[in-house]
Amino acid sequence: MRAQIGIIGAGPAGLMLAHLLNRRGIESVIIESRSREEIERTIRAGVLEQMTVDLLNETGAGERMMKMGMFHKGIEIRFNGKRRRIDMHELTGGKYVTIYPQHEVIKDLISARVKSGGEMYFSVSNVRLSDLDTAEPTITYLNENQEEEEIICDYIAGCDGFHGPSRQSIPADIRREYQKIYPYSWLGILAEAPPSAPELIYAHHEDGFALHSTRTPEIQRFYLQVDPADCIEDWSDERIWEKLRLRLSTDDEWRLIEGPVIQKNIVPMRSFICDPMQYGRLFLAGDAAHIVPPTGAKGLNLAMADVQVLAGALHDYYANGETRRLERYSAVCLRRIWKAERFSWYMTSMLHRHHHDSPFDYQIQLAELDHATSSKAAAQSLAENYVGLPLELEEQPLSVI
Ligand code: FAD
Ligand code: DHB
């Protein structure tokens, strides 16, 4: 088979890239190792930046999101039993964040793909990339019937997440990897209960971090900081509610509304960047190239930013043979990615309990929380990062304020 662009992975990065290319008349083939049913029901992100919302709307994939999504003007930060609201709308000149689950974004993008008639193959295995530094980079794989297939491409987009094969296909002596593993994981649950608050609550507590998010008026999403060695069997529903009650508690009348837990899982926390994000005719996008800890709610949004840069650069190539933006892809993306990494690290460090911290470090952490929520300049910085930094599609000179 021949394709202009071979896309590995049908996550937010791969599906949005295919959607953007299709709108520019560029053909692509998507291959995905899991089944459609599985990717449409994997529970992950919930918070979309304004840029992601605008992108879905401008490309005709935002209709369900505008009906089902929830538009939040602020978040609450809790510590020492106190509640402090960050009014993001006010502090950023009118921006929102939108709560709309990742698996719904996936459904919307898959249905756009089906409607466009674009090729997409699920349940593939043994994916290998070759000839990346030639004019005919190639993907080979076994299709769902275990038959070998080959796609000879102009370019390959590695959108196969952190564990996919694309990044590993960049020779080790060219790839520089930066990583930080955090000494905690997140236990995430979905519960059948009404929301206990109108906006998301990020809570720092001596016992550990907790987050109250939402999905629908009937289903809420909660996260708890847990030990990375914990397994799901260590966390009975009763223990989860006890910790949520404790860590979200305030010194006023606020009460947590509980309900049956319908889903739970544990995810590790890491920061990771691969530099460069390209090699020959392979381009990495999304989690294949970088991971952020989820506290800043940035992962899916970064994936959407990468593919906008990549789609623009590929358009230049097909429209007029211009490869300058393709050559600068990694540099353009990494400048913004490092800032999102910094913000995610900052939110993670500020909000989690580091049980081995000295009393001094702990007091500094509380002072950081107090400053972030009581200084207008600090709250504004948090807000502008949380709603999303501006996206630059091309290299820009360093701006000076
Ligand atoms: P993925 O979603 O990982 O997609 C990669 C795809 O490639 C997968 O479907 C996978 O099956 C497929 N694949 C893998 N290997 C192969 C192969 N060999 N061949 C073919 N296909 C392959 N982000 C936010 O922006 N906001 C949030 O609120 C947020 N909250 C989060 C909460 C949690 C608990 C977690 C875990 C993540 C959260 N994220 C959030 C991060 C977000 O979910 C990811 O950053 C996002 O899924 C990245 O998209 P992607 O397309 O790059 O990768
Ligand atoms: C959700 C996930 C996050 O990582 C976050 O910071 C806020 C909300 C969520 O899944 O709803």
Image (tube, rainbow, N blue to C red):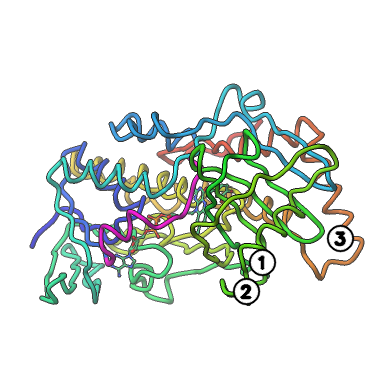
On residue 234, which mark appears? 2
Q: Which residue is mark 1?
A: 226
Q: Viewer-proximal residue, 253 or 50?
A: 253
Label 2 Cα crowd, 10 Å radius (few <14 / some 14-19 / many 20+): few
**C-alpha distance separating marks 2 and 1:** 10 Å
Q: Nearer the viewer, mark 2 or mark 3?
A: 2
Kindly state the secondary structure of the residue where label 3 is placed.
Answer: helix
Name the residue at 34% across, 45% down: 325
Dividing the image into four quarters, tell me where ligand 1 lies.
bottom left
Q: Position of residue 358 (x, y in %)?
A: 88, 66
Name the residue at 21% across, 36% down: 23
Q: Nearer the viewer, mark 1 or mark 3?
A: 1
Mark 2 beta carbon near ligand 1 (under 8 Å): no
Which residues are drawn in magenta? 33-48
Q: Viewer-proximal residue, 147 or 133?
A: 147
Label 3 Cα crowd, 10 Å radius (few <14 / some 14-19 / many 20+): few
**C-alpha distance separating marks 1 and 3:** 20 Å
Residue 43 is inside the magenta segment: yes
User: Quarter-wise, where is residue 108 in the image?
Assistant: top left
Horizontal side, residue 361 vs residue 343: left or right: right
Q: Which residue is mark 3?
A: 361
**Quadrant, the C terminus:** top right
Q: Viewer-proximal residue, 269 or 258?
A: 258
- Residue 155's place in the image compared with 253, above or below, is below
Instruction: Residue type at mark 2: give it.
Output: Asp
- Residue 270's place in the image compared with 343, above or below, is below
Answer with mark 2 or mark 1, whichever residue precedes in sequence: 1
**Residues at discs 2 and 1 in contact (Cβ within 8 Å):** yes
Residue 19 is inside the magenta segment: no
